[in-house]
Amino acid sequence: MQDKPGYPKLLVLEERFPCYNAVHKMGACVGDEIILVNSSDVIPLMGKVTEGKVITLRDICRALAEMHGVQGCCTLTTGIFTMTIANAVEEAKAQGKDSTLSEIPWWRTLKSDGFLNNKYPGGQENQKRLLESEGHKINTRGKRFQLADLEQHLFQAR
């Protein structure tokens, strides 16, 4: 999770970018500046989400874009960082490390549209259990889970 030198990095959005469709859905267009961030930029946003609230990858990206004064944020790298952070938190807890990292409520970070993340520790079933323990209702959508009433539970990152 070590930060990469030279990041955050500004890029001009191109259609060939792997994150193009997601960033475009958030309102960025070809030629707009977007940001590629480090995990250290994502950690504070995930860490601020209080019990009873959640944040989505889309909202994290919007907050990061706003902080950097650009139109968008790469959802692909940011999504990888949320998964990496979640796994690092659980690894720190398993090793008995007392750090600020172990305090991050990673299970409150959802995919866009409120879907749970199968790449988090214990898969989406564990994330579902943790969210339900905080009073959230989870709907089953085929093999996927989605938070019910997402808009009512969103944490305001900005």
Image (cartoon, grey):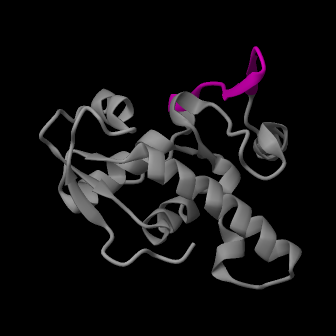
**In this picture, is 10 found above or below 127?**
below
Q: Quadrant of the C terminus?
A: bottom left
Please give left or right for residue 62 compared with residue 145 in the image. left
Q: Determine which quarter of the picture holds residue 46.
A: bottom right
Q: Residue furthest bottom?
A: 98
Q: Residue furthest top?
A: 142
- Residue in view at x 22 percent, y 59 percent: 10
User: Is 147 part of what is drawn in magenta?
Assistant: yes
Residue 42 position within the rendered picture, expressed as x and y whole percent measured from the top left = 47, 62
- Residue in view at x 49 percent, y 66 percent: 39
**In this picture, is 34 found above or below 150?**
below
- Residue in view at x 29 percent, y 35 percent: 16
Please give left or right for residue 93 compared with residue 16 in the image. right
Q: Residue furthest front?
A: 16
| Count of marks, rendered view | 0
Q: Quadrant of the N terminus?
A: bottom right
Q: Which residues are magenta?
A: 138-151
Residue closer to the observer: 33 or 102: 33
- Residue in view at x 79 percent, y 53 percent: 121
Residue closer to the observer: 79 or 57: 79
Residue 52 position within the rendered picture, expressed as x and y whole percent measured from the top left = 65, 46
Q: Determine which quarter of the picture holds residue 7.
A: bottom left
Q: Determine which quarter of the picture holds residue 8.
A: bottom left
User: Is 3 part of what is drawn in magenta?
Assistant: no
**In this picture, is 7 found above or below 80?**
below
Answer yes or no: is residue 51 visible: no
Please give left or right for residue 29 compared with residue 152 in the image. left
Residue 104 position within the rendered picture, expressed as x and y whole percent measured from the top left = 65, 66
Residue 44 position within the rendered picture, expressed as x and y whole percent measured from the top left = 49, 68
Answer yes or no: is residue 120 visible: yes
